Image: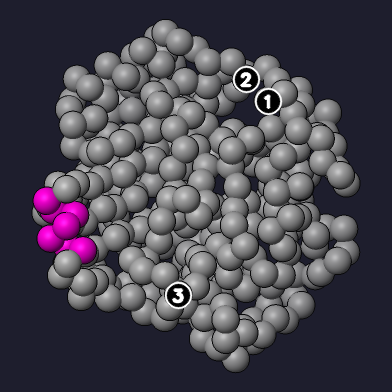
Amino acid sequence: MFIRTRNRQPTFIQLKLLNKMQENTQRSDEIAKLISGNGYNKQVSEISVSIIDLKNPSEIFGTNMDLFMYPASVFKIFIGAEILRQIEIGKYSLDQEITIKPLNGIPKELKLYPDPRTTLKTGDKVSIDHALYLMLAVSDNTASNALYELVGVESIVENAIEPNGWNGTGPTKYFLGRLKARKPYRHTEMIQTSARHVAEFFALVEQEKLISPFVSEKLKDHMSKYDKTVKRGYSIPHFLQYHKSGYLETNLYTSKRFGSLVKNVITKGWAFQRYMHDAGVVKGQNSHYVIAIFTLSKQLNPRKYFHMDRLAKDIFEYMENKNES
């Protein structure tokens, strides 16, 4: 059932697409067997996979598709959709400049794997279009906070989430919160979404039906500009058209809180947790599909990585063979 909003109702196209989206239980079983057969489910604490075969976009399949998780940077797609909607109706323009406010700046965190990217700083001036690029292609958190504040939480929910029936997906007052006010880093209760909702989002984008063709095309354009030379262990295959990944770590080894480290190890058995997600559109010789993979690892060894690329490759081969037959 769709939630009606105060200012906007679902478009006919969105209703037609999402109301017809049914789970293909046979293919869900096949994906579940692929994951368990290769031991991927034992390599992480939680795993969620959603796939939409764009050759038959009325169906969705996967495993744990409705498991809600902290989405990390994947949530930036919803911010992008709403700012582009407001641009299309004339509230803002792509070349309009915004100034980065002090509260939107993100300080560098002490992390086991430091972020090498150069991000926007307080006082920088940037066009909305370039901020969109930084948010969607580079995943600049400062740009994300600035655009998030510009459009407002309520607008994102009312125009980019509720009209599509994505109940349960939702933000809080600030996308990245206030790092100085709360440690360690980030918590799942702040913001959440599911692999199913993200897969449906990308399906609408690929069919140019996410709000409007303009919104869909601009989202697709910026997400396709990701740095293809950067080798990430959680990227989807080489046939990837465009995507949005997400990463977040809670590392008690570098938190300078020895008491919390010892307590977590004794009571919970982990001292490091990692959210690692990816979602996008893949197009092979025989396949054309949307995939969303969400994972959470809780472990003692922070250097142990889940190789999402291997899972994505296995799913790619499954999709290629399935459509060939």
Q: Earlier in the sequence, mark 1 or mark 3?
A: 1
Relative to 121, is 170 above or below? Answer: above
Q: Position of residue 242 (x, y in %)?
A: 50, 48
Numbered label attached to residue 21: 2
Is residue 135 visible to us here?
no
Q: Which residues fall within the magenta stretch?
A: 260-266
At 45% from the left and 75% from the top, the residue drawn is 181
Q: Position of residue 73 (x, y in %)?
A: 47, 57
What's under tag 3, amino acid-wise? Ala
The crowding category of the residue bearing disc 2, from other C-alpha atoms within 10 Å (few below 14, some 14 to 19, many at least 20), is some
Which quadrant: the C terminus? top left
How far, Cα to Cα, is label 2 from label 1? 5 Å
What's under tag 2, amino acid-wise? Met
How far, Cα to Cα, is label 3 from label 2? 41 Å
Q: Earlier in the sequence, mark 3 or mark 2?
A: 2
Residue 174 counted in the magenta span: no
What's under tag 1, amino acid-wise? Leu
Image quadrant of residue 175? bottom right
Q: Position of residue 148 (x, y in %)?
A: 64, 65
Q: Disc 2 on helix, strand or loop? A: loop
The crowding category of the residue bearing disc 3, from other C-alpha atoms within 10 Å (few below 14, some 14 to 19, many at least 20), is few
Q: Which residue is mark 1?
A: 18
Q: Are discs 2 and 1 less than 8 Å apart at CB? A: yes
Q: Which residue is mark 3?
A: 181
Left or right position of 258 against 117: left
Residue 261 counted in the magenta span: yes
Q: Position of residue 4 (x, y in %)?
A: 81, 35
Relative to 227, is 49 above or below? Answer: above
| Viewer-side residue, 257 vs 71 | 257
Q: Residue furthest bottom?
A: 123
Which quadrant: the N terminus? top right
**Between marks 3 and 2 in the image, the one whose residue lies nearer the viewer:** 3
